[in-house]
Image: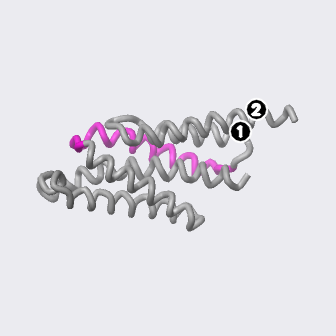
Amino acid sequence: MTSLVLPVLTLCVATLLAGAGAVLAFFRRTPAAAVSFAAMLVAALSGLVAFDSGSLWFWGCAAVIAAIIPYAAPVADSQARLYTVGAALAGSAVGLVGGTVAWVVLGAAAGAFLGFFAYTRTPRGVRAGASLSRLDILAALGLPAVVNFSIIMLIFAQLIQI
């Protein structure tokens, strides 16, 4: 009984970090993917979930890139972020039903694209600018959201298998 206390506590910390990563994704220039990757590391350290070292390295590098991109990209308005990040969250949740990592990532990417596309159809989105700057904004918002919510959904998929 006492041997489960530490793994359960680490899973609770991982869950709190993943929740923080999900919330931080909606704020401008926050390292949400890095927080979510920290949740993945903590979950892996618990011993109750299994992430192989290759996956940890891949998602760690992706989280670093996703944390840097918002600082190098143009600033998007909050409505564009809400549409893109919210749709990426929904897409990754739908992708989770597919049961594989590929479905989660594709669902998040499709959600981010469709969310940004929906934003460009709003009055604010029409005034957003030329197509090249829109592509920059989509990449700046979409890639970090895809990485962040893919990590979170992969943690969630491991937790529901316990």
User: Residue 8: image x %, image y %?
Assistant: 73, 37
| Amino acid type assigned to the residue bearing label 1 in the image | Ser
Most extreme residue toward the bottom is 98
- Prevailing secondary structure class for the magenta stretch in the rendered image: helix
| Amino acid type assigned to the residue bearing label 2 in the image | Leu
Q: Residue at x 32, y 58 (%)?
A: 115
Q: Residue at x 70, y 55 (%)?
A: 161
Tally of numbered discs? 2
Mark 1 residue element: helix
Q: Residue at x 32, y 43 (%)?
A: 69
Residue designated by label 1: 46
Mark 2 residue element: helix
Residue designated by label 2: 6
Q: Is residue 61 magenta?
A: yes
Closest to the observer, 147 or 89: 89
Mark 2 Cα shell of 10 Å, populated few (<14), some (14-19), many (≥20): few
Judge from the rendering whether residue 15 lies leftward or rightward of residue 135; answer left or right. right
Q: Is residue 49 magenta?
A: no
How many angstroms separate mark 1 from mark 2 (CA)? 7 Å
Mark positioned earlier in the residue sequence (1 or 2): 2
Q: Is residue 112 above or below residue 70?
A: below
Q: Write down the region rendered in magenta.
A: 50-77
Q: Residue at x 60, y 40 (%)?
A: 15
